Amino acid sequence: EAQVTQNPRYLITVTGKKLTVTCSQNMNHEYMSWYRQDPGLGLRQIYYSMNVEVTDKGDVPEGYKVSRKEKRNFPLILESPSPNQTSLYFCASRTSGSYEQYFGPGTRLTVT
Amino acid sequence: KQEVTQIPAALSVPEGENLVLNCSFTDSAIYNLQWFRQDPGKGLTSLLLIQSSQREQTSGRLNASLDKSSGRSTLYIAASQPGDSATYLCAVLDAGNMLTFGGGTRLMVKP
């Protein structure tokens, strides 16, 4: 089944403790991206990657890092999480040609 | 910068009604427009994708139209059902590869 997977789905952590949210897609998509969703602010792009080893900032990249060492994986790294990074995070990948977006199930992160 | 607006923000209708959700965008230089459905606390499910060169797309009871020159898209849902209750999001992809979302329309269909 074609899908985007994220892990973990739920995470509660403390300020300053480094964490990684993994994202994987099995559709051989070149383009992948990360979004956060907050009440009243909607979905905002954090980082995106056009291909392996090619990443760039989205609208709200501060406090986040990404890497793209393999085509299928695009992890989101929070080196020193803060409470304002409490949010619902989505990973997405995109087809070539039609540029249709496919989203993962989301990761609900709480930073205390 | 692209701005996407969805009206209304919330909508409540009785089962069986046909309804229209609206999406407008400020910059008509888009690559495509995509409609999504999101259930509470869940991920986004793609409903319809309209390329900039297309006028409409249909899938079952859903029909989406696009008027790029006026910066508008509509999602038409025929014969609404309680299972259609969800938040509907539109998103436009611009030539700079940026995907911009609207704030969503929260739909409730009452039995």
Image (tube, rainbow, N blue to C red):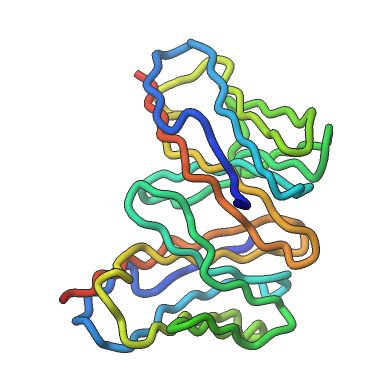
Q: Residue at x 80, y 65 (%)?
A: A97
Residue located farthest toward the left when viewing the structure as drawn: B111
Q: Up-down: is A104 above or below A53?
A: below
Farthest residue in the front direction?
A: A1
Quadrant for the N terminus of chain B in the image = bottom right
Residue placed furthest toward the top:
A17
Percent x, y for residue A15? 42, 14
- As drawn, is B51 to the left or to the right of B104? right
Q: Is residue A105 above or below residue A84?
A: below
Residue visible at 66% across and 39% down in the picture: A47
User: Residue B87 location in percent, x, y?
Assistant: 36, 63
Residue located at (21% from left, 82% from top): B15
Occupied quadrant, residue A72: top right
Across the whole image, how many numbered discs are drawn on residues?
Answer: 0
Q: Position of residue B53 (x, y in %)?
A: 74, 83
> Which residue is at a point 45% across and 45% down the rendered structure image?
A37
The quarter of the picture where residue B54 lies is bottom right
Give the percent coordinates (x, y) of residue A69.
79, 28
In-image side of B31 versus A7 (left or right):
right
The C terminus of chain B is located in which quarter? bottom left
Front residue of A25/B3: it is A25
